[in-house]
Amino acid sequence: MNIGEVAERAGLPAKTIRYYEDIKLIRPARDGNGYRAFGENDLHKLTFLSRARALGFTIENCRALLALWEDQSRASSDVKRIAGEHLDEIDRKIADLQSMRDTLGDLVRDCAGDGRPDCPILTGLGKLRS
């Protein structure tokens, strides 16, 4: 397969595939004319990477997961550890977003939103942290 074909099948832009090759996540074969020649294994790796990135895994996490995916003697505990750490990070981000939502919700609720210059939103944003 050429890069256009594998990009379509993997659901990734060709630019992303070239980037993955640049950072050595994938290593497609080259034809005699120098063009990339992707095989089914490359397609599986790219699909794997696409799904992992869609779940928010970092490039380095993807590198580790891909290595584990390719290692038939891997311990599933290694995979679970990486995924668990990522899940913990997602939970932290959700908690941070909920806190931001609550704070902004309070500021919006407290603002009359009328013609007066007094604005609790601007006051709240301008407060120094103690």
Image (cartoon, rainbow, N blue to C red):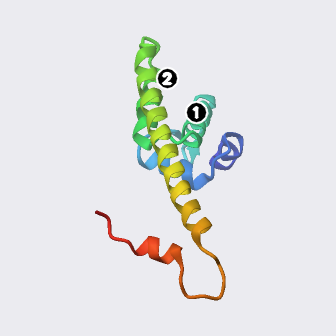
Please give the name of the residue rendered at 59% of the width and 73% of the height, measured from the top-left corner.
111
Q: Secondary structure at mark 2?
A: helix
**Residue under pointer 1:** 48
Does label 2 or label 1 sit earlier along the sequence?
A: 1
Question: Which residue shows up at 46% across the image and 21% down it?
Answer: 80
> Left or right: where does residue 114 sit relative to residue 17?
right
In the picture shown, does residue 64 fall above or below 56?
above
What type is the residue that disc 2 sits on? Trp
Position of residue 87 measured from the top left corner of the image (x, y, whole percent): 49, 33
Do callouts 2 and 1 mark residues in contact (Cβ within 8 Å)? yes
Choose top left, top right, bottom left or bottom right for residue 82.
top left
Please say if 127 is above or below 47: below
Quadrant of the snapshot with the C terminus: bottom left
Cα separation, mark 2 vs mark 1, equals 9 Å
Q: Position of residue 23 (x, y in %)?
A: 41, 46
Question: Residue 69: which disc?
Answer: 2
Residue 73 locus on image (x, y percent)? 42, 11
Quadrant into which the N terminus falls: top right
The amino acid at mark 1 is Phe
Residue 115 sits in quarter: bottom right
Q: Residues within 10 Å of mark 1 (few under 14, many from 20)?
A: some
